[in-house]
Amino acid sequence: MPRTTFENDFQLQLGLQESSALSNQISMPRPQALTSSNVIAVKDSLKDICTRFDFLGHRQQYLCTLNENILNLYCDIIAVKDILKDICTRFDFLGHRQQYLCTLNENILNVVAAGARMGIEECQNQFKMSRWNCTTFGNTSQVFGSVLTFKSRETAFVYAISSAGVAYAVTRACSRGELNECSCDNRVRLKKPRTSWQWGGCSEDIHFGEKFSRDFVDSKEDEDSEEALMNLHNNEAGRRVSTKIHLGILGTKGRLCNQRSLGLDGCKLLCCGRGYMTRIREVEEKCNCKFVWCCNVKCEICRYKREEYVCN
């Protein structure tokens, strides 16, 4: 599986030299000829070192004394967590809870970003024939512009679809083994099949996906305000299932409309009464398809002109 940009940055900041130097610094020298007195001396030194790490619990300190390699492993883990914490705290657009969740796994932000992208794509697909088509802006910290600052149906849908996207992406990442905090939902395998069919896959643990989405997406909302309670409701709804320039919406100029429709996709409504123009476009499509034994379908390529209607 190719590394993501976040993983590459993480590995770059970690650095192999730092990890190697850290290991060399804390490694315990092995005596060439082990005698009973040497073994006792090594164990006493190791015990002395391990008990100095007050961040370790009693059980961890005991395991540390069993082998110096365990101590090296502890230090490597701590170094990784410190670097990951430093990276996550730099994302000032995340709340404190979100930054903490980021430190748990270097892959988690990539998964959240993938879920957000799926939410945006689905939003744009659902509203592609509406005046507001889930417009996004790439040069600002507010992806949807100022639309989300208004209490509207569009805002409610964005919150719901974004929350659903994160839940879905986290669930898929769990089933693919990309997150250490979760895995397959094994409960499906425990059911006895009525036929000879055997389960050979990994069931997706939707419960963890919903829980993480609730924990991550909802964490920035203040439950004391009515607007936050509305956003939380819309987030949960997503997990369960008039163009104005000052709103930060790009408008419908240049959008395709349906000349024969009286609905929202019709040229009269979609173009906001400004009118539309007709253009002719040459298109290519498969035609005259035939089934050839066995087992192909052969088609010809037909070219024809199509009328399209574009808002002024």
Image (cartoon, rainbow, N blue to C red):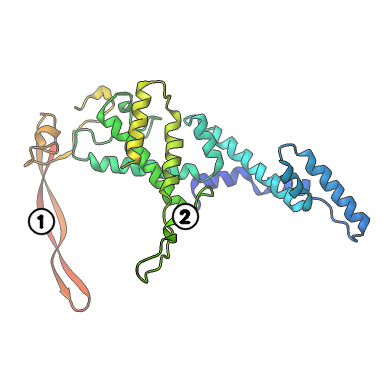
Label 1 sits on a secondary structure element that is strand
Relative to 69, residue 271 above or below: above
- Residue at 42%, 51% (x, y): give it: 172
Residue 102: horizontal and vertical position, in percent? 52, 39
Q: Amino acid at mark 2?
A: Cys
Q: Does any portion of residue 312 appear in the rendered image?
A: no
- Classify mark 2: residues with Cα within 10 Å, few (<14), some (14-19) or many (20+): some
Q: Which mark is residue 184?
A: 2
Judge from the rendering whether residue 208 lies leftward or rightward of residue 16; answer left or right: left
Q: Which mark is residue 65?
A: none
Relative to 254, residue 226 above or below: above
Residue 88: horizontal and vertical position, in percent? 54, 36
Residue found farthest to the bottom = 293
- Residue at 46%, 44% (x, y): give it: 110
Q: Which mark is residue 304?
A: 1
- Classify mark 1: residues with Cα within 10 Å, few (<14), some (14-19) or many (20+): few
Q: Quadrant of residue 151?
A: top left
